[in-house]
Image (cartoon, rainbow, N blue to C red):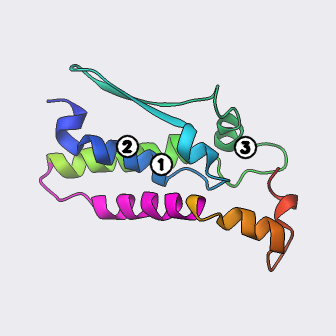
């Protein structure tokens, strides 16, 4: 039995997306690819389309807030989902689906563009992002 039969394609796709750091939504939309064959499924972070994924994962001299979001957070959530399914415990799929839905909604409604235009209480948005 492969991983997809254990946790399902939707959950396999939603867990990595729900653990991505929130930026302008570009990483969420273009940074994760799923390849499915009859024998396996593979999730890949696309460093060609979104080269800063590497710096988010590894950190920089100036910012280490998202270090390990793939290695620690995403992999732990995927492993937990597989172990829970193997033990017959229902996975908390709704949590990941809801996080992914909220992020997509924020991106499509232009939340970050509004914040950039009107400022943000507590600091300048441009000081942290691009």
Residue 49 lies, in percent from the top left, at: 63, 30
Determine which residue is flagged by label 2: 13
In this rendering, does residue 67 appear at all? yes
Residue 39, label in figure: none
Residue 22 against residue 29 in the figure, above or below? below
Q: Residue at x 55, y 47 (%)?
A: 28
The total of numbered circles placed on residues is 3
When asked about the image quadrant of residue 43, the answer is top left
Boundaries of the magenta span: 87-107
Question: What residue would you read off at disc 1?
Answer: 17
* Spatial separation of the CA atoms under disc 3 and disc 2: 24 Å
Q: Residues within 10 Å of mark 3 (few under 14, many from 20)?
A: some
Compared across the picture, whether 3 is left or right of 45 comes to left
Q: Quadrant of the N terminus?
A: top left
Question: Image point 57% across, 64% down: which residue?
Answer: 106
Choose the circle earlier in sequence order: 3 or 1.
Answer: 1
State whether the magenta stretch is mostly helix, strand or loop: helix
């Amino acid at each position: 039995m492969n991983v997809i039969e254990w946790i399902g394609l939707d959950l396999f796709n939603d867990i990595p997306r729900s653990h991505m750091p929130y930026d302008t939504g570009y990483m969420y939309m273009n940074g994760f690819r799923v390849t499915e064959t009859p024998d396996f499924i593979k999730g890949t972070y696309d460093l060609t389309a979104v080269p800063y994924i590497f710096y988010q994962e590894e950190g920089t001299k100036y910012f280490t807030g998202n270090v390990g979001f793939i290695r620690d957070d995403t992999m732990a959530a995927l492993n937990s989902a597989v172990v829970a399914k193997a033990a017959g415990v229902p996975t908390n799929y709704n949590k990941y689906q809801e996080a992914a839905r909220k992020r997509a909604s924020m991106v499509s409604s232009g939340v970050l563009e509004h914040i950039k235009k009107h400022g943000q209480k507590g600091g300048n948005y441009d000081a942290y992002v691009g």
